[in-house]
Image (tube, grey):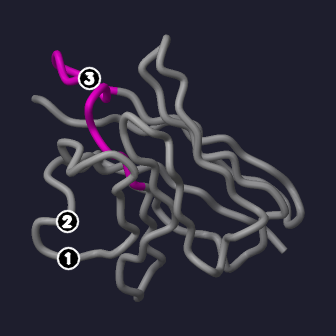
Amino acid sequence: QLQPVESGGGLVESGGSLRLSCSGSGGFTLDRYAIGWFRQAPGKEREGVACISWPSYVTKYADSVKGRFTIFRDQTRDLVYLQMNSLNPEDTAVYYCAAIRSPGPGVCTVEVGEGRYDFWGQGTQVTVSS
């Protein structure tokens, strides 16, 4: 099945760091796609975290993670990373990688909505203990 695949989730103490990875599978590659990271905590709606455009690597972040999270691409390895620092229990959620054929240079969105992204991964759990 063509979809992005997340990895790197786990349990970390408050103040710690994790790096999530997003890759393609089943012949799906991230080249030419804008990529977004989203998360959903128990009992809450899915929210956008960060995104990165293609081909120009413009990035956007939700206010809640600015200064703590960094999204970046490794084009040679066809990976998109989400580096998460200074984690706190409020960051506990399932994190999803999503992709959409690049809508244009410098364009990506952290908004959740119909048609914003075409392909979604299965998610990876991030748990931050206090």
Q: Residue 127 in the image: state x and y as whole percent.
A: 65, 62
Image quadrant holding the C terminus, namely: bottom right
Q: Amino acid at mark 2?
A: Arg
Residue topped by disc 2: 116
Q: Amino acid at mark 1?
A: Gly
Which stretch appears magenta?
A: 24-36
Residue 4: image quadrant is top left
The answer to whether residue 69 is left or right of residue 3 is right
Give the class, few, some or many, for how many residues have Cα within 10 Å of label 2's Cα (few <14, many ≥20).
Answer: some
The answer to whether residue 17 is left or right of residue 33 is right
Q: Is residue 31 magenta?
A: yes
Give how far apart the Cα atoms at labels 2 and 3 are. 18 Å
In the image shown, does 105 or 11 lie closer to the viewer? Answer: 105
Q: Residue at x 78, y 66 (%)?
A: 67
Task: Answer above or below: position of 128 versus 6.
Answer: below
Give how far apart the Cα atoms at labels 2 and 1 are. 6 Å
Residue topped by disc 3: 29
Q: Residue 76 in the image: state x and y as whole percent.
A: 49, 11
Task: Answer above or below: position of 128 versus 105.
Answer: below
